[in-house]
Image (tube, rainbow, N blue to C red):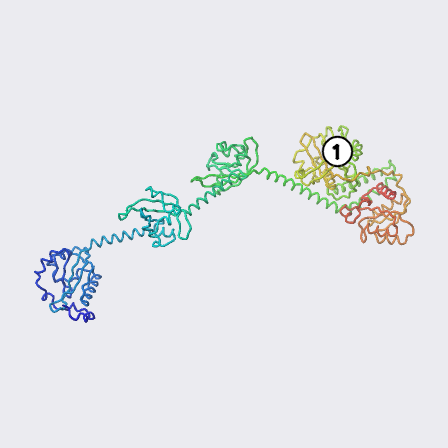
């Protein structure tokens, strides 16, 4: 046997140079019969790895006859990897003297195929115990190796599949309900490691509400796609959809339960349901009509859905609507306009179009709509969802806005012309005053037969026409100076009726209808008479073949609803004057422009200032004027003037007889215009008054300082350089406390009011004035008690 075994463990391998193996072998015959009878391969090699002895099983394994194997080296039948492995095993056995068991390596057979051998390798020694070779007894495990490899691959394949499956899989013992196996997906859903779950009762996690009993599985029924709860280890629950089937695994009856987490899906379903519910509520409760119909290249397809508002607004039931098309509810002219190929092309390209149309209700009533059309996909086909809004109120508002804008532009025109008139009124009035005044003075000295009398008459007439034109410009520009008095409109109309009958043609009948107990008004009586005259003359022109003119008084009370329909008006109590005619009437276009300055339907015969003047006077009084007319059916002008709570104390302005104009009082005349000052001086001097004349305030005070007599009246211009008329009067009143004052001015009321001379009781004469007007007004002021 092997000697000095311990020392050989540390020596390098020497079996490749050991003595010849053949001289040391025992008699081979003694083994052959035994070794050829076993199925395992038997081999003996010398220390160099050369075959020395082998049995038939070994020859069969390699596919060689015995004579072709004798003396060959084992390295011829293995690759380099296995050769290295053989060397290491032999070296180990040689060093340790211990057999190496279960060693597997691959041999190459004669046909090139590979055989896997599992062998036990031991050391062969001589009679002295010296190593002379190695002995190997091996078993062909090629098929077993293949089977094990296949099983391992199958296991790895199954494990890979189980790991990659997103569904949870659990194998449950059918009798004990314990968990036998679980895949990673199921463990992740439960929230624990697989080893922490194995062996647990399934109801700890699955169907916790079953409390240990699962009726479906207990009854042996197949469970397929049933919703249940999964209890996680953190105490939370999630919804699952599970399927359970029976199976026999390793002779054990089992349940294989697969499940998926449907909590996200459930939340998505709930979200979809909530969205659908919101959409249903939105679709049903939206205040706009909604129509859905398929998109067709030509023609119109019936509606496939409408909302409740559509049914209510159009008067059709839902079933009736689903038999109609968009063409059935659209006015013919709009169908032709909006259903053109170009329109369809634009809708197809942009998927969105907004346009207007006229729709027809079941009752036949037409109304304007705005259609917001969108193309969307529904179940794989394009449909049009049209949101249809009733824009009747918007259209009315747009028309009202346009009307207000027209009125605003008209007001701007009036304001512009009024400013222009106000700007030049002072200078024009100062120029017209001497023209009219001197003309009248010259007429007094000429007889009717003098040809110069007619010339002067025409000059005075032209001057008065220019004065009236200035007054008209100021009137519709609301810049004229008004003398407000509390008056009875009935008395004004009744008193003016006589003049009206002498002015209006005889082929026109005049009716005056006065309502009793109407409220008083606060107005400039002369201007109200101007309104009556202008409207009556305008009515006369509308009745070239005669007709009837009616003047009616009454009262009206406007509330917020009335003012909403009448832009620019205010709520309150009004006294009303209506002037109607039976003339040719006006269309809407003329009515929109009727109050505009310089607009006339009379061509070159009209100035376009008559109704504009009326409009300005009424507005300056804080009132409103409206017109209602139809071609061929006459016209009615309605004038509303704010009612006054004051009681009328003054009747129509009385006329002072010309004989009462003369006087002997002393008058201080202050006027910065030379022509007006000189004219006024001559008029008053001829009437017998003593006149003190000054160009301005400081000069007037200087004149009074050297005058010792009394002064009865201060006749002064309002606007003067250095000192205005009001301040001058205050200074003069310090010396003459009982002195009276008469202001004169060619400026507009806004300028005069700024100087504080439009207060109640203050007397004013407006330039240009006539000789009669100045003399009468001076006498009136001096005679006041």
Residue 708 falls left or right of residue 251? right
- Residue 575, visible in the rendered structure: yes
Q: Nearer the viewer, residue 580 or 6?
A: 6
What is the quadrant of the N terminus in the image? bottom left
Question: In x, y percent, where is residue 433?
Answer: 81, 44
Quadrant of the image occupied by residue 648: top right
| SS of the residue under disc 1 | strand
Residue matched to label 1: 553
Q: Quadrant of the C terminus?
A: top right
Q: Within 10 Å of the Cα at label 1, are there few (<14), some (14-19), or many (20+) other Cα atoms?
A: many
Q: Could you tell me residue 605's position as x and y percent?
A: 73, 35
Position of residue 674 measured from the top left corner of the image (x, y, whole percent): 83, 49
Foreground: 472 or 332?
A: 332
575 or 219, which is in the foreground? 219
Residue 346 seen in this snapshot:
no
User: How many discs appear?
Assistant: 1
Say above or below: 345 vs 15.
above
Q: Position of residue 63 (x, y in %)?
A: 14, 55
């Amino acid at each position: 046997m092997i000697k000095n075994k311990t020392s050989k463990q540390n020596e390098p391998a020497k079996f490749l140079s050991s003595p010849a193996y053949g001289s040391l072998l025992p008699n081979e015959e003694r083994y052959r019969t035994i070794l050829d009878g076993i199925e395992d391969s038997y081999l003996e090699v010398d220390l160099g790895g050369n075959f020395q002895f082998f049995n038939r099983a070994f020859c069969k394994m390699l596919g060689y006859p015995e004579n072709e194997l004798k003396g060959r080296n084992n390295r011829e039948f293995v690759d380099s990897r296995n050769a290295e492995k053989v060397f290491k095993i032999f070296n180990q056995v040689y060093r340790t003297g211990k057999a190496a068991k279960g060693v597997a390596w691959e041999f190459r057979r004669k046909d090139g195929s590979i055989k896997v051998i599992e062998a036990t390798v031991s050391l062969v020694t001589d009679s002295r115990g010296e190593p002379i070779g190695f002995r190997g007894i091996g078993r062909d495990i090629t098929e077993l190796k293949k089977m094990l490899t296949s099983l391992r691959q199958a296991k790895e394949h199954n494990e890979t599949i189980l790991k990659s499956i997103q569904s949870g899989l659990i194998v449950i013992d059918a009798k004990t309900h314990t968990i036998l196996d679980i895949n990673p997906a199921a463990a992740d859903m439960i929230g624990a490691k697989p080893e922490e779950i194995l062996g647990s009762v399934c109801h700890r996690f699955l169907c916790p509400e079953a409390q240990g009993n699962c009726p479906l599985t207990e009854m042996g029924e197949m469970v397929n796609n049933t919703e249940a709860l999964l209890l996680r280890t953190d105490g939370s629950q999630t919804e699952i959809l599970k399927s359970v089937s029976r199976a026999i695994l390793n002779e054990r009856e089992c349940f294989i339960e697969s499940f998926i987490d449907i909590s996200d899906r459930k939340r998505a379903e709930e979200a979809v349901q909530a969205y659908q519910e919101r959409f249903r509520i939105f679709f049903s409760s939206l205040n706009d009509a909604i129509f859905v119909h398929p998109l067709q290249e030509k023609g119109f397809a019936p509606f496939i859905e409408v909302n409740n508002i559509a049914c209510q607004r159009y008067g059709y039931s839902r079933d009736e609507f689903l038999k109609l098309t968009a063409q059935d509810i659209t006015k013919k002219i709009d169908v032709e306009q909006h259903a053109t190929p170009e329109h369809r092309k634009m809708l197809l390209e942009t998927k969105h179009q907004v346009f207007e149309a006229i729709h027809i209700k079941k009752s036949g009533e037409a109304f304007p709509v705005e259609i917001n059309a969108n193309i969307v996909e529904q179940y794989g086909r394009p449909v049009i969802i049209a949101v249809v809004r009733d824009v009747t109120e918007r259209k009315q508002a747009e028309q009202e806005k346009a009307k207000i804008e027209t009125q605003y532009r008209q007001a701007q025109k009036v304001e512009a012309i009024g400013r222009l008139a106000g700007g030049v009124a002072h200078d024009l009035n100062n120029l017209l005053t001497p023209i009219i005044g001197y003309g009248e003075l010259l007429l007094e000295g000429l007889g009717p037969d003098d040809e110069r009398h007619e010339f002067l008459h025409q000059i005075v007439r032209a001057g008065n026409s220019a004065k009236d034109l200035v007054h008209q410009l100021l009137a519709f520009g609301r810049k004229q100076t008004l003398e407000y008095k509390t008056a009875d409109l009935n008395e004004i109309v009744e008193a003016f009726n006589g003049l009206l009958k002498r002015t209006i043609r005889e082929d026109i009948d005049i009716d005056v209808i006065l309502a009793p107990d109407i409220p008083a008004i606060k107005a400039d009586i002369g201007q109200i008479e101007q309104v009556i005259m202008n409207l009556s003359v305008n009515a006369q022109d509308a009745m070239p073949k005669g007709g009837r003119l009616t003047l009616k008084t009454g009262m009206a009370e406007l509330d917020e609803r009335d003012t909403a329909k009448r832009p620019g008006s205010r709520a309150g109590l009004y006294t009303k004057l209506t002037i109607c005619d039976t003339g040719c009437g006006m269309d809407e276009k003329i009515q929109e422009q009727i109050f505009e300055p310089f607009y006339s339907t009379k061509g070159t015969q009209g100035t376009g200032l008559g109704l504009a003047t009326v409009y300005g006077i009424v507005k300056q009084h804080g009132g409103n004027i409206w017109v209602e007319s139809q071609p061929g059916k006459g016209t009615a002008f309605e004038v509303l003037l704010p009612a006054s709570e004051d009681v009328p104390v003054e009747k129509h302005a009385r006329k002072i007889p010309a004989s009462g104009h003369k006087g002997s009082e002393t008058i201080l005349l202050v006027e910065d215009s030379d022509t007006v000052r000189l004219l006024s001086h001559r008029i008053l001097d001829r009437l017998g008054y003593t006149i003190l004349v000054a160009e301005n305030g400081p000069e007037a005070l200087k004149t009074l300082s050297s005058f010792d007599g009394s002064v009865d009246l201060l006749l002064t211009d309002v606007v003067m350089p250095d000192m205005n008329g009001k301040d001058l009067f205050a200074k003069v009143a310090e010396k003459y406390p009982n002195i009276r004052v008469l202001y004169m001015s060619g400026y507009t009321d806004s300028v005069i009011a700024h100087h504080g001379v439009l207060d109640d009781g203050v007397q004013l004469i407006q330039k240009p004035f006539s000789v009669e007007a100045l003399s009468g007004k001076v006498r009136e002021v001096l005679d006041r008690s």
